[in-house]
Amino acid sequence: MSDVLLGSILSALSTGLGAIPILFLQKTITHRWRDILLAFTAGIMMTAAMLGLIPESLKYGGIIEVSIGLFLGVLVLTSLERAIPHIDLEHTKSGIKFDEKALLIIAAITLHNIPEGLSVGVSYASSGSSANETGNLIAFAIGLQNAPEGFLVALFLINQSIKRGKAFLIATATGAVEIVASLLGYYLTNYVGFLVPYGLAFAAGAMLFIIYKELIPESHGDGNEQFATYSFITGILCMVILINSF
């Protein structure tokens, strides 16, 4: 219990850690660097899902459980995206009033963090001696990808004339939902053992949805495809190295 709580807190607070540079940044980040950060995030999440969550799901279940869990994760994220208004970080419409726009952005990012928290909790709930290792790996991966995400959220809010300190606090708060989601995922799978493979695959499906539906298109929509591609591969290699180190 203490491990999942600590892991979820650290991964969630990484959002605020990534937003710290915004307090000292004098000039706005270029679109190219924004796309590079998004692609790097996608590479980290891809590796965590394919080399962390899915293999663990196969270990405790089978291809049927993995398939069901993956599609459930995708379907739930699809339903949530349709139910909650979604606005891209850089492609917002000027017709929306400032307060409403900022609120919707925060809601969209908070929604984005729910499956990430679930993936951390479910990973720690896996039975066996490798549970903590898997949980630590996933928590670390989520923390790594939360850092650039926190930076981008704070940057958007500053571009909407929100003061730097307030933007930093809001960006940090968006990651707090991961702690609740992580504990929920942990208790559900820890006390209902047969849900473990489904839960791991569900978290992987949710992450893969975010990668392909959000991060990759966002990083390839403004002429920086080559830089984003290299950054994506770099993110994968970083996570492969980390996985081999555990």
Image (tube, grey):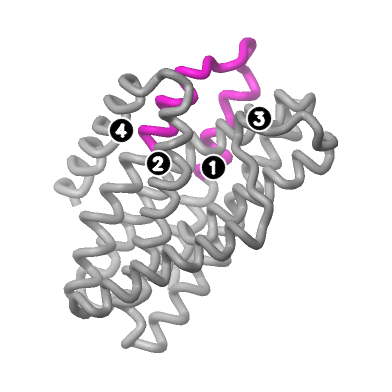
Circle 3 crowding by C-alpha within 10 Å: few under 14, some 14–19, many from 20:
some
Which residue in the protein does label 3 denote? 156
- Marks 1 and 3 close (CB-CB < 8 Å): no
Query: What secondary structure is the magenta-colored segment mainly?
Result: helix
Q: Earlier in the sequence, mark 1 or mark 3?
A: 1
Residue 30 counted in the magenta span:
yes
Look at 48% across and 34% down and name the residue there. 218
Real-space CA distance between mark 4 and mark 3, rounded to the nearest whole angstrom? 22 Å
**Vertical arrangement, residue 214 with respect to residue 219, above or below:** below
- Residue type at mark 2? Leu
Q: SS of the residue at dot 3?
A: helix
Q: SS of the residue at dot 4?
A: helix
Q: Which mark is residue 232?
A: 4
Q: Which mark is residue 15?
A: 1
Q: Earlier in the sequence, mark 4 or mark 1?
A: 1
- Mark in the foreground, 4 or 2: 4
